[in-house]
Image (cartoon, rainbow, N blue to C red):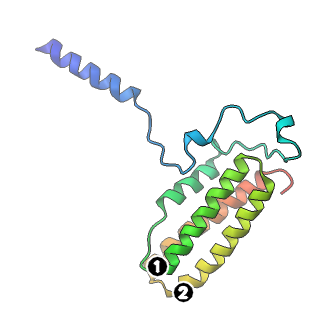
Amino acid sequence: MKRLIFLGVLIILTSSCATEKLNLSPLSNNFYSDTKGSDSDRGSKKNFNINIKENVNASEISNMISTFPKFKNNGLNDEVTSLKYSLQNYLYAIDASNSAGKSRALKSFEKSYKKIQKLRQNLDRDDDEVLNRYLVRLKTNISVIEDALPGS
């Protein structure tokens, strides 16, 4: 009986240590490849020299994209979806060293951000505070990433 209990505990311990952590990031592991291509494959693209997969600020943006709250205002929710899409494109563009794509994604982000600021006026106090926290964290993380990029 003791051997059976010991064996059960051993199996549970072994299996719990062997499982991988769930990745909720919108940038899935399949998106990244170990070989990004040589510099000659990139042509005239500017290499950003930032590992977006290991960057803390990019990880926080990914987490905020997946945890952004829903609001009672459907127009605001639509604009938040557009903002999240822009952020996702921004991270993809940085990972691919695509400066034109990064610029388009930032412009789209700014456009959605301004629309959300106008729609915030109709929110109750609690929703406004939650939305403000998310927006401030997003802007801060984008600023830190932009400051880390060469030529920014």
In the rendering, which numbered label is found on residue 146? none
Residue 132 visible here: no
Quadrant hosting residue 7: top left
Q: Secondary structure at mark 1?
A: helix
Quick check: 95 left or right of 9? right
Q: Residue at x 71, y 56 (%)?
A: 144
Percent of width and height locating residue 111 = 68, 75
How many dots with numbers? 2
Amino acid of disc 2: Gln
The residue under label 2 is: 121
Compared to residue 13, the image places residue 42 above or below, namely: below
Quadrant hosting residue 87: bottom right
> Marks 1/2: CA distance?
14 Å
Compared to residue 52, the image places residue 136 above or below, namely: below
Percent of width and height locating residue 116 = 59, 78
Q: Residue at x 81, y 33 (%)?
A: 38
Badge 1 density bin: few <14, some 14–19, many ≥20, Cα 10 Å: few
Residue 49 visible here: yes
Badge 2 density bin: few <14, some 14–19, many ≥20, Cα 10 Å: few
Q: Residue at x 63, y 41 (%)?
A: 54
* Quadrant into which the C terminus falls: bottom right
Amino acid of disc 1: Asn
**Residue extending furthest toward the left:** 1
Percent of width and height locating residue 106 = 72, 64
Q: Residue at x 87, y 35 (%)?
A: 40
